[in-house]
Image: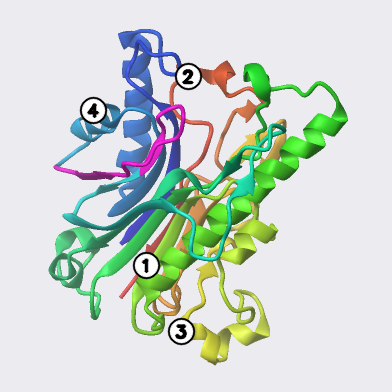
Amino acid sequence: MLLGTWNLENLYRPGGPYGPKDEAAYGAKLAALAAVITELDPALLGVQEVGDPEALKDLAGILDDDWHVALSEHADSRGIRVGFLSRAPLTVVADTAAFPAGLRPVQADDSGLAVGQAGRGVLAVEVEDGVLRDGPVWGGPLLREGPLRVAVCHLKSKLLSYPDGRFQPRDEGERARYGAYALYRRAAEATALRALADELLEGDGRARDVAVLGDLNDETQAATTQILLGPPGSELGTPGYDRDDRGDATRLWDVAPLIPAGQRWSRVNSGRRELIDHILLSHRLVRRVTAAGTGLPGEGPPTLPSVGPDPAERRGAPGSDHAPVWVRIGG
């Protein structure tokens, strides 16, 4: 099966302040997204930046066959949220924006405003065990025990916004402060996501199929991304990977090292390629990965536009400014 994550970039129906201005532009965006999803052919795709729940249903409606949709009820101030497109029926097991117990609210701006929950909710689903165990969608029997559990997220962006709707700071002091506020929030959200991962793993990652995926808004070695991994050690590409240890039960593995170096990016920020969309897998799942990549399988490096600090510049643009990130999992 192919498991993926993709930031769909401002998926809104036309007429609002953030989406396409007319039906023609909306149709072009849907067609571009649908073409990629059809070629990618995922069994399960986590999605981000769904600004209008009906827009995701419109997208699912023009795809081949019947698709199941799940969406978080926790949207940010622009209405964007995370969700899933799946060929198999889904059961929502968690939809939360809450910080875990013990983590206090963090400062969000110069006024001293403190936020005590994630800006966008984290959604976790289970896929029916019977479908996964044996079915044409999933490529045959996987000899599994229990359901596949997957959480999708969209952490606080590194693209900074300032009071009065500005995307440029008044001075470097303001830039530094708001960079820190964004980092506080992203770290707190990563901590909340890790707490949910612990619930999904139930301390038994050697026997449970768990994936955490989405737009982490930072790269592989960033401190916020590292929070999600759990106990240190056994990373892919290190001598410890093939050695079992007690951390395997609760650890998650970022599949980034399995992506060919020549395509290891999912976004281009002011001309710089970066991998900010990630897939993390439990011990049981990561051992069955047969391939990983960005963009479309077999097509080489993704072709992406370079984006700047103002997300409004691409309002109504077809497709997405992110590339899908995917893994193929065998039996």
Residue that numbered label 1 is attached to: 329
Mark 2 and 1 residues: CB-CB less than 8 Å, in contact?
no
Q: In this view, does 310 lie to the left or right of 179?
A: left
Mark 3 and 2 residues: CB-CB less than 8 Å, in contact?
no
Q: Which residue lies furthest to the right in this view?
A: 172
- Specify whether residue 254 is in view: yes
Residue that numbered label 3 is attached to: 249
The amino acid at mark 1 is Ile
Q: Is residue 121 left or right of residue 112?
A: left
Give how far apart the Cα atoms at labels 2 and 1 are. 33 Å
Label for residue 317? 2
Give how far apart the Cα atoms at labels 4 and 1 are. 28 Å
Label for residue 58? 4
Which is more N-terminal, label 1 or label 3?
3
Give how far apart the Cα atoms at labels 3 and 2 are. 43 Å
Which is more N-terminal, label 1 or label 2?
2
Which is more N-terminal, label 1 or label 4?
4
Label the magenta part by its dominant secondary structure: loop
Residue 181 vertical placement versus 127 (above, below): above
Which is more N-terminal, label 4 or label 2?
4
* Image point (45%, 50%), residue name: 153
Stretch in magenta: 66-82
* Image point (20%, 55%), residue name: 90
How far across and down, in percent of the image, does residue 28 sit?
36, 18
